[in-house]
Image (cartoon, rainbow, N blue to C red):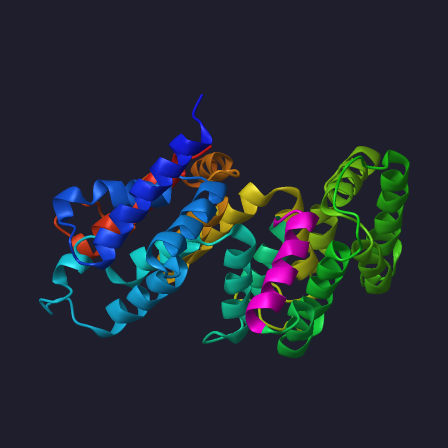
Amino acid sequence: MASIRDFAKRYEADCRHLNQFFSGNVSPNNARPVLEIFTARSSQEMKQICRAYSSMYRQDLIQLLSQQKTTFAVIPASDPLVSKHISILSGSIAIRVACLRASEPCVRDADIARDALFGRRIDGDVLVEVVCTRPSGEVALIRQAYQARYSASLERDVSSRTSGSLNEVLLAFLGSSGSGYHGGRVDATMAMCDAKTLYEAVEISAARVDQRSVLQLLRHRSGDQLRAVLASYRRLYGQELARALKRKDGDTSGGGGGRRGESSSFPGILRAALRCAQLPERHFARAVRAALERGGGAAREALVRTVVTRAGVDVRRVNQAFAAKTGWTLESVVRNEFGSGGTGKSDDGLTGDLLVELLKLA
């Protein structure tokens, strides 16, 4: 069994490899140790590596990676001063993968949410993804990390930057993460009562969903309890709540940030949020498929976000869900989008290698 000293030596070795990279002293043929640092280390190990790097070199590893990302975005690949770096961790995409992997999950997700709120456009799909696929306890940590990094409240920024049904659903889920109950045993009796409440709010209430009742319930249920509610709904009424919401999803006005072609009505956004909470692997598989259909750079961004955030969580289930719908594996899509390190496309090759290695993490 490895001792604390053995782990410390390995972290120090990783730090030396990284420092050689930042110093420009790593050739493409010796890039494997750098690759393994970002693919074979757990989140906790990456945290220790960041601490060790700061202790050894008096520099912040994540800040260095961010600077490299900016540098690669503005300096041509033909520049001799950076060409050998570009052949190792090329372009802003590979560095983005490294940054996301080096960050603590709650910090990483806080940054993703910030970009979705203040990037080139408000990305409601990504906001729903971050807030609704993570367990309630993790969302609470994301809120804390967001406050620490940006001196701002995630709830307040969501409230001011989004509108309509998207705003209401996001704030309800964020409210549940701040309720103080983040897991443990679920209350089966409460779940049955809540399922009946949802049935009345969706199926019995006139032509529209009783939004007030639904939102009130969401604000006070943890992720585990909500999944129990949805399972109870299926047992009681013989169908998923999502099916009932789909029938009600006739009004596509009043959105607030969803992508064109997806419903922005309350039933539509609630259905997407519940899918994220109940079956996150299906959400991510669907997100990659939708990005591939849109084309452009959407597929690359969706692949990076999906693989990096679900590696070590449920990436294999995401792969299975994706393959069941398309007949392709995520690895084949990654290789198609980025190539590999051996193809000669050095600007994309290592990005592909990084993602493929992360796909192997259970």
Report the magenta residues as a range. 134-150
Name the chief secondary structure element in magenta: helix
Residue 73 position in % (x across, y down): 27, 70
Residue 138 position in % (x across, y down): 64, 50
Residue 349 position in % (x across, y down): 22, 49
Task: Say which quarter of the image contains residue 178.
Answer: bottom right
Residue at left 15%, top 66%?
A: 77
In terms of depth relative to the viewer, which is nearer, 88 or 191?
88
Q: Is residue 138 left or right of residue 109?
A: right
Q: Is residue 146 magenta?
A: yes
Residue at left 70%, top 47%?
A: 243
Q: Is residue 61 magenta?
A: no
Residue at left 84%, top 35%?
A: 236
- Can residue 67 be seen here? The reply is yes
In terms of depth relative to the viewer, which is nearer, 237 or 85?
85
Task: Say which quarter of the image contains residue 193.
Answer: top right
Number of callouts = 0
Question: Which residue is most to the top?
Answer: 1
Residue at left 45%, top 40%?
A: 42
- Can residue 336 be seen here? The reply is no
Figure quadrant of the N terminus: top left
In terms of depth relative to the viewer, which is nearer, 143 or 339?
143
Q: Is residue 265 left or right of residue 313?
A: right
Task: Work out whether 304 lies above or below 313.
Answer: below
In terms of depth relative to the viewer, which is nearer, 280 or 272?
280
Residue 292 position in % (x across, y down): 38, 54
